[in-house]
Image (cartoon, rainbow, N blue to C red):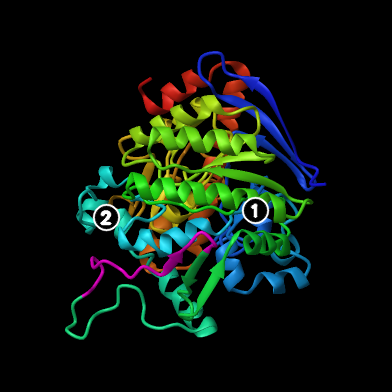
């Protein structure tokens, strides 16, 4: 048995926010909670000891990437992912379905998991994907990290030209429509590895076997994630495929692991209702909401409003969402856990999180741009209200110096700050639900209810 359980401990009297406790064999997770993403078995720039010292309760690793390198069977032979990464607390793994999307329609439609997940807000409808439309932050290269990572990736695992490499005429191809690297059938998903160009096949049985080899505590059923630009007919077909794969995932999954079913249906109301009812009818330990959430954040809120009233009290996970305003809006609607690379990714790109009392707002996305020349002589900590190791010791001027100098230590210090910031925010949200003041806290952060 998985040793998994969930209990709702407190409910907000004004909204649908709730505080609860997920119990696993490796530890407890107080909810609401933002699960840090450890794609390759590591929260990038941090060690597992850093996660423990920050008080991280759990992390989420990526089935697709770990299957390709170093290989799930190797990790299994070495004692599982917990031992491999030196982290004894609960681990989630996803099913690999989203990566199949990102290699397929995500490439065709120029839609990624972070930044341009809502195409309408970034002028991606009907077309277009340049830096001005996305905002500078989403287009920047991470100055050292990206090149080091890609170089080591190619050296260790092979592979051809870089993404966005120049053509023979010297002109970049960054805005060109990219090749769809997946083939999806009712049997499963074939995908072309970005590492070596080889084709691989993933279905529900293989996804469950990979996640079993990894030994995670909470796994996701195999699903097909559709694009916000997919039409009704394709989204419906993909939803039914996801339902078939959900049943297969239940059949093949390791019973020592808890399993969440994933609701699909895009941003079509009848499909979301159908998918919700089907997934709820299955013996999953928890429910995840995935796939396209529409063309704007308002669409996402509508999708949740269609979905959540049809759920029971099993834990609810929202896949791939983790911006501060989104967390408040989605917790208010009854979401328990989230996962998102945004806090750690934006740290590496020069954006450090800022509380309202230190100048953070919905307008600036609660971010301080450490690259700005105005911080060259600023001896304040990133956020004077923050108690993280970075803010307790280092100034904005020093962090800016590290960033513009390309010092690798910047990545660790910035990531420590952003992750600590989000952990404390989630703690304050849980406490506000217990005390009956969640909507007041939400109002202070978002300045409008």
Magenta residues, dominant SS class: loop
Q: Nearer the viewer, residue 307 or 395?
A: 307
Q: What kind of element bears circle 2?
A: helix
The residue depicted at 42 percent of the width and 22 percent of the height is 443
Residue 309 at x, y percent in the picture: 52, 24
The residue depicted at 41 percent of the width and 43 percent of the height is 266
Q: CA distance from mark 2 to mark 1?
A: 43 Å
Q: Nearer the viewer, residue 417 or 303?
A: 303
Residue 353 at x, y percent in the picture: 43, 44
Kindly report which numbered mark, 2 or 1, lies closer to the viewer in this rendering. 1
The residue depicted at 61 percent of the width and 17 percent of the height is 435
Counting residues from the N terminus, which is met first, the one under dot 2 or under dot 1? Answer: 2
Q: Is residue 22 left or right of residue 275?
A: right
Label 2 CA crowd tier, 10 Å (few <14, some 14–19, many 20+) = few
Residue ID for mark 1: 248
Please report the bounds of the magenta region as a residue range: 172-188
Is residue 222 visible in the rendered image? The answer is: yes
Residue 390 at x, y percent in the picture: 53, 50
Residue ID for mark 2: 136
The residue depicted at 19 percent of the width and 82 percent of the height is 170
Q: Is residue 137 left or right of residue 436?
A: left
For residue 187, what is the image quadrant?
A: bottom right
Quadrant occupied by the C terminus: top left
Label 1 CA crowd tier, 10 Å (few <14, some 14–19, many 20+) = some
């Amino acid at each position: 048995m998985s040793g998994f359980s969930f209990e709702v401990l407190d409910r907000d009297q004004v909204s649908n926010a709730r505080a609860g406790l997920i119990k696993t064999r490796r530890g407890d997770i107080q909810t609401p909670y933002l699960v840090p993403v450890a794609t390759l078995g590591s929260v990038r720039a941090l060690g597992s000891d850093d996660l423990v010292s920050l008080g991280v309760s759990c992390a989420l690793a990526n089935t697709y990437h770990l299957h390709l390198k170093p290989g799930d069977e190797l990790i299994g032979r070495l004692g599982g992912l917990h031992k491999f990464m030196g982290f004894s607390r609960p681990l989630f793994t996803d099913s690999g379905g989203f990566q199949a999307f990102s290699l397929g329609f995500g490439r065709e439609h120029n839609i990624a998991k972070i930044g341009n997940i809502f195409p309408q807000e970034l002028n991606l409808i009907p077309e277009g994907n340049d830096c001005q439309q996305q905002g500078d932050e989403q287009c920047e290269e991470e100055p050292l990290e990206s090149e080091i990572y890609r170089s080591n990736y190619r050296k260790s695992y092979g592979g051809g030209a870089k993404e966005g490499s120049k053509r023979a005429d010297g002109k970049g191809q960054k805005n060109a429509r990219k090749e769809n690297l997946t083939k999806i059938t009712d049997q499963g998903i074939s995908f072309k590895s970005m590492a070596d160009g080889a084709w691989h096949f993933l279905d529900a049985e293989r996804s469950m076997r990979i996640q079993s080899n990894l030994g995670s505590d909470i796994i996701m059923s195999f699903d097909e994630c559709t694009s916000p630009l997919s039409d009704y007919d394709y989204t419906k077909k993909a939803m039914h495929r996801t339902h078939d794969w959900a049943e297969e995932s239940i059949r093949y999954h390791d019973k020592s692991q808890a399993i969440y079913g994933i609701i699909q249906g895009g941003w079509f109301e009848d499909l979301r209702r159908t998918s919700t009812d089907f997934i709820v009818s299955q013996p999953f330990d928890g429910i995840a909401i995935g796939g396209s959430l529409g063309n704007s954040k308002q669409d996402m809120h509508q999708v949740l409003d269609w979905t959540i009233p049809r759920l029971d009290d099993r834990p609810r996970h929202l896949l791939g969402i983790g911006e501060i305003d989104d967390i408040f809006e989605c917790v208010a609607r009854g979401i328990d856990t989230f996962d998102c690379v945004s806090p750690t990714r934006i740290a590496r790109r020069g954006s450090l999180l800022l509380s309202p009392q230190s100048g953070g707002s919905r307008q600036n996305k609660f971010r301080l741009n450490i690259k700005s020349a105005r911080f060259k002589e600023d001896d304040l900590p990133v956020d004077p209200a923050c108690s993280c190791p970075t803010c307790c010791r280092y100034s904005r001027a020093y962090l800016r110096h590290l960033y513009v100098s390309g010092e690798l230590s910047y990545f660790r210090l910035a990531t420590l700050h952003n992750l600590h910031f989000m952990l404390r925010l989630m703690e304050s949200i849980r406490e506000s639900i217990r005390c009956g003041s969640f909507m007041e806290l939400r109002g202070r952060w978002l300045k409008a209810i």
